[in-house]
């Protein structure tokens, strides 16, 4: 038989060269399959840091906190339960936002590596909070029900779901101006507001018990979650800024106002929620104190996005700054976490 030489065959198809997309956004499934050369070094650096930070919930002996929990007041127990009611489903909600709203619209493989690790971390956080529910005498059904039955908690979730719903609609085209705006809105809703403000506010309350020498092991679990979340936030902010830089048509005063207003709306929702979290206050902590911290966090997030601070309040929880500084984020790559890194722990 005569070989057909004038048309391509499977064997003759040349190996694909890395197709460098012109921007970080895109939806070509065939693109972004070759890692090197790395274009967005920050994404790969964050991936490496995230891998070094790997931890497992049962490394913490949570049972040792049971004595403390038994001695705590009803209001204090309510606060821990309320936090679990919020954190548990929302860790999974963040994963949906990554899977439906971020991963499909990003082409850079280094960003995909990071997102894959982040998704495992959110799963790990969910399991960590399940470990809390299993260990402490908390009614799981009641805790689960609260995220839809408590209006201030349900409102936060409804706000987030609105953005991810849009990202999973068939009509969303990431190549259009409106599609790119939706991508940014979704990142602001999840990375900046949910992870960067609401979660941090909850972490502060969770860690406040350790400040009073209570729930120290629970505090260690939260430390590890916070360390992961600080990278999630860093990745999200970098991604937002990269998309804005690569798509200058997004940089309009109207869109900037909308983003800024989203953050301010997020603060209002959190303030209502914190009144339900601590209706009467516990030792050293009440809703006003937490909400000042929320405003402080919101100002930092606004600045990280390039806005002016809005509230101008100082950090009421300076002890949080020592343990889990939001400013550490700025110098994150200089920071060393040797006591927690996998390599350090096993050596
Ligand atoms: Fe998380
Ligand atoms: Fe996260």
Image: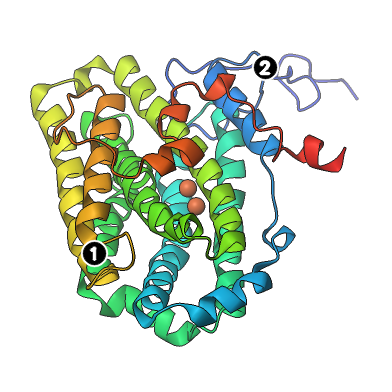
- Number of the label disc, if any, that sits on residue 36: 2
Residue 341: % across, % down? 72, 37
| Location of residue 152 (image quadrant) | bottom left
In the rendered image of this protein, does residue 26 appear above or below residue 37?
A: below
Side (left or right) of 218 relative to 299: right
Label placed on residue 65: none
Residue at figure coordinates x 58%, y 29% from the top left: 46
Query: Residue 294's spot in the image, x, y percent?
Result: 26, 47
The crowd level at tag 2 (other Cα within 10 Å; few <14, some 14-19, many 20+) is: few
On the rendered structure, is 295 left or right of 3? Answer: left
Seen at 26% across and 30% down, the residue is 176
Spatial distance from mark 2 to mark 1, Cα to Cα? 45 Å
Q: Which mark is residue 273?
A: 1
**Callout 1: few (<14), some (14-19), or many (20+) C-alpha neighbours within 10 Å?**
many
User: Please, what secondary structure does the residue beneath circle 1 have?
Assistant: helix
Res. 27 in view: no
Task: Please tell me in which quadrant of the rendered image residue 44 appears.
Answer: top right
Question: Percent from the top left, x then y, of residue 10?
Answer: 76, 28
Q: Write the residue at 54% across / 35% down.
A: 29
Task: Label 2: state its secondary structure.
Answer: loop
Residue at image location 33% in from the left, 40% down from the top? 192
In the picture, measured across the screen, residue 30 lies left or right of residue 159, that is: right
Quadrant location, the N terminus: top right
Closer-to-camera residue (289/46): 289
């Amino acid at each position: 038989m005569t070989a057909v030489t004038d048309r391509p065959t499977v064997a003759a198809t040349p190996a694909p060269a890395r197709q460098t997309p012109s921007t970080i956004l895109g939806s070509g499934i065939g693109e972004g399959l070759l890692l090197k050369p790395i274009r967005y070094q920050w994404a790969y650096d964050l991936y490496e840091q995230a891998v070094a930070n790997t931890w497992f919930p049962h490394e913490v002996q949570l049972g040792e906190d049971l004595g403390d929990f038994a001695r705590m007041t009803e209001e204090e127990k309510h606060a821990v339960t309320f936090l679990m009611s919020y954190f548990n489903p929302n860790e999974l909600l963040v994963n949906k936002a990554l899977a439906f709203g971020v991963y499909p619209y990003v082409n850079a493989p280094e960003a995909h590596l990071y997102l894959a690790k982040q998704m495992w971390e959110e799963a790990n956080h969910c399991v960590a909070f399940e470990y809390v529910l299993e260990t402490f005498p908390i009614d799981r059904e009641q805790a689960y029900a609260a995220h839809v039955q408590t209006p201030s908690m349900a409102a936060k979730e409804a706000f987030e779901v609105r953005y991810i719903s849009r990202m999973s609609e068939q009509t969303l085209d990431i190549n259009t101006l409106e599609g790119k705006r939706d991508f940014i809105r979704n990142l602001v809703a999840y990375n900046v507001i949910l992870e960067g403000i609401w979660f941090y506010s909850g972490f502060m309350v969770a860690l406040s018990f350790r400040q009073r020498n209570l729930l120290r092991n629970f505090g260690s679990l939260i430390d590890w979650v916070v360390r992961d979340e600080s990278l999630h936030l860093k990745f999200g902010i970098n991604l937002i800024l990269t998309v804005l830089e690569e798509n200058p048509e997004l940089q309009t005063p109207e869109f900037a106002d909308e983003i800024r207003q989203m953050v301010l709306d997020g603060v209002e929702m959190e303030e209502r929620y914190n009144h339900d979290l601590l209706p009467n206050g516990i030792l050293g902590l009440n809703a006003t104190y937490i909400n000042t911290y929320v405003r402080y966090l919101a100002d930092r997030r606004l600045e990280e996005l390039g806005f002016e601070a809005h509230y101008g309040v100082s950090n009421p929880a300076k002890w949080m700054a020592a343990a889990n500084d939001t400013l550490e984020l700025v110098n994150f790559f200089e920071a060393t976490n040797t006591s927690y890194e996998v390599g350090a722990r096993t050596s």
